[in-house]
Image (tube, helix red, strand yellow):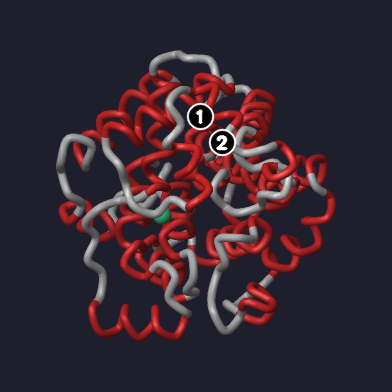
Amino acid sequence: MLLGIAIGDACGAPFENLSFQDATNKLASVGLSPTRYTDDTQQALAIAEMMASGDEITPLKLANSFLTAYARDPRHGYSRQTLRMLLSPDPTSFLTSIPDHEKSERKTDGAAMRAPPLGFFPDRRKVIESAVLCASITHGHPDAIAATVAVSLLTHERLYQATPYPNLWRIIRNDVRNINPDMISWCDTCAGLLIPDREILLGEYAPYGVPYTESRIFLGVVIFLLTRYWDDPCRLLKEAIQLGGDTDTVAAVVLGIALIRGGEKSRIWDLVEGIEDGPYGREYVISIGNSLSERFSQ
Ligand SMILES: [Mg+2]
């Protein structure tokens, strides 16, 4: 899963913030050239490291893990607001660096992007509680919390139940509704789409792409992509990039989930070679992924 996140992140990063038209043109002319992963993989790694070492998920420990990961290896891609938090001198300052009223308005996809490892907890209730807590320390808006819970449950369902992709949304729908009923009809529509209809998937953002500012749109896109393209990881990656906008986060999350099981023979794995292998690069990601799997092996 972590390697899938890193592949999607590193492949999507060169297209981040491009409109769908520019992203599509660039993909056609330059192709895929993964190098460095960004904030998405780094924060997922930070959570995976905690879980693999047996640490409990608490606000202070999460804050400490995010601070440590960034300080040892500053990565590109964080928003200005998150960078402000990451430059805090200690975990307590991290947690208080954004006022509560500001936090409660934050609905970007920055919490959902790091949520896949939380699905490794065998207890479904613990997955949900951890996801709520993990989102709340940085993103308090119900859209962001619901998207975080959804992403962690998608991982959990694939890992422990091998839930078929077309059924995934139906299986987690009630859990998302319990957090934020306002997102349900949007996600229902996205899950039922047969083609990437930009007007429906992206609404007012159709001419651009997936906005990092809207967890609701992000989650709808993730559900659509996994429901339609789960059986071909290369196509999944391509479709994620061609939607434009927050390409690295969308690609990281959908590939992370899609490569939990299955896809062993896909050519997607050829892309791993391209990911840099510095101190926290490719081999490090693989080692933490292995530790996480060993701790929660079924
Ligand atoms: Mg990123």
For the N terminus, which image quadrant? top left
Which amino acid does the dot numbered 1 rest on? Phe
State if disc 1 and disc 2 touch (CB < 8 Å).
yes
| Picture coordinates of residue 168, whole percent (x, y) | 64, 50
Q: Residue at x 64, y 60 (%)?
A: 214
Which circle marks residue 156 in the picture? Answer: 2
Quick one: SS at disc 1?
Answer: helix
Q: Where is 168 relative to 115, above or below?
A: below
Which residue carries the number 1 mark? 120
| Picture coordinates of residue 289, whole percent (x, y) | 33, 32
The quadrant in which residue 224 appears is bottom right
| Picture coordinates of residue 297, whole percent (x, y) | 42, 22
Depth check: give the residue in front, 113 or 296: 113
| Picture coordinates of residue 49, whole percent (x, y) | 38, 25
The CA distance from mark 2 to mark 1 is 6 Å
Which amino acid does the dot numbered 2 rest on? His
The quadrant in which residue 42 appears is top left
Depth check: give the residue in front, 68 or 202: 68
Please state if 265 lies on the left or on the right of 260 as rendered. Answer: left
Q: Is residue 298 visible?
A: no
Q: Where is 226 relative to 210, above or below?
A: above
Q: Residue at x 57, y 53 (%)?
A: 109
